[in-house]
Amino acid sequence: MEDGMTRQQRVFFYVQHLLGIGHLARASRIASALAADGFDVTVVTGGTPVPGFPASDLKHVALPPVVAGDKGFSGLADETGNPVDDDFKNRRRDMLLDAFRTCDPDVVIFEAFPFGRRQMRFELMPLLALIETSSPRPLVATSLRDILQERTKPGRAEEMLDLVQTHFDLVLVHGDPAFARLEETFPYAQEIADKVAYTGLVAGSPAMAPLERFDVLVSAGGGAVGKELIGAGLEAAKLLPPELQWCLITGPNLPQVDYDAFEAAAPGNVKLFRFRQDFASLLSGARLSVSQAGYNTVCDIIRAGCASLLIPFTAGGETEQSTRAVRLAKLGLAGVLPENEVTPARLARDVETLLARAKPAMPPLDLEGATHTAAILRERLSKVPVKPSRSA
């Protein structure tokens, strides 16, 4: 019989990626750190499959995938691009609730919600209701990046506040407060200050020495919205000296027809890839990174100590990447190129300027957010009754 006081504590981790893969990648890093700390982790995903995420050391429940209906996140569609109907939503909801019952967790982590993923209320509100009727009730946490999307619709911030106050025990902010604080992008942060815990930035482990070295490393994240960046990078490479070696990483979601066209047009000093497992290692050997300003990419850049040119994603009124890029620019850690100003000539000029600068000195930001998250949960769980073993 398993000792109820020493059994593995169970974590039920919900993550829904809709457009890029950043949410899934960050959640996977955290979930793997929880597993390494001895937690029994079940990750529930609801987006299109991404090879390698979540990691093989984790239990995984895959709900029928949904994606953003458009770049503004205003609707939901299935894998074929068709809007989802009520039957589809009900099937997902029931699968999610069944997965929760099977897991019988000590901790439930909602990635982004209620500060994001409002489109998923059809299944998350029933899950919260089920949690509230559970005995014993698990610890409920939300997992947030350090900079939130600005909310312009009246009542949205108040709605988030009410949900946190009613249902959540812990707000895990995956950032270093020396760089960004929750109250800077959430107006009611002081009202939930007793629930907020800063974990540090969730960066990957220090990278191995690079197997290849490039002068310029252009990456487009998941690739769903990176076609323009990759195309501009390809043309910019032709405008600069051919001695410069370029690596262009399109992301797994770039349509194959576009990838084939880019590959055919690439000059000899440009290498094109869909994905590189050793991306962090390549960053450590690159002179300059050109990318969007997503959380995970910026964490990798800071960890590698690489100079960067950031092109924030702004479609659909998105503000989070712009806020992060401007902060990094003020620290002298990055150049910023607005998305609507990207042309091959402008990109080539900015790349040339940044390559001529000295390598930036990285500030001592806390990059161990994944392992700190595990420690924070252990500490919080030590203050609540332990669930009995299933075999007890």
Image (cartoon, grey):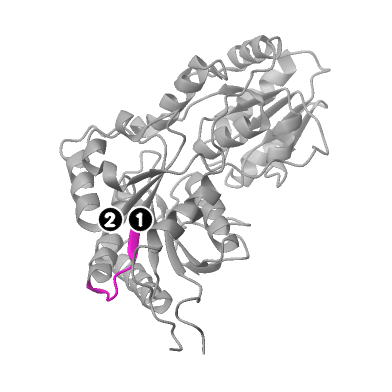
As drawn, 380 above or below 161: below
Residue nearest the observer in this picture, 303 or 62: 303
As drawn, 304 above or below 98: above
Query: What kind of residue is marked 2?
Result: Phe
Q: Residue at x 48, y 15 (%)?
A: 330
Residue 83 visible in the current orientation: no
- In the rendered image, residue 101, in percent from the top left (x then y), is placed at 36, 77
- The numbered mark, 1 or 2, whose residue comes first in the sequence reads 1
Question: The C terminus lies in which quarter of the figure?
Answer: bottom left
- In the rendered image, residue 122, in percent from the top left (x then y), is placed at 26, 61
What residue does disc 1 label?
141
Q: Quadrant of residue 221?
A: top right
How far apart are labels 1 and 2 at the CA level? 6 Å
| Image-based side of 7 in relation to 240, left or right | left
Local SS, label 1: strand
Residue nearest the observer in this picture, 328 or 347: 328
- In the rendered image, residue 138, in percent from the top left (x then y), is placed at 33, 67
- In the rendered image, residue 52, in percent from the top left (x then y), is placed at 63, 57
As drawn, 237 above or below 75: above
Q: Residue at x 21, y 40 (%)?
A: 191
Residue 138 part of the magenta-drawn span: yes
Q: Quadrant of residue 255?
A: top right
Q: Quadrant of residue 123?
A: bottom left
Dot 1 and dot 2 residues touching (CB under 8 Å): yes
From the image, give the main secondary structure of the stretch colored magenta: loop
Local SS, label 2: loop
The magenta span reads 133-140
Query: What kind of residue is marked 1?
Result: Ala
What residue does disc 2 label?
168
Q: Residue at x 66, y 40 (%)?
A: 259
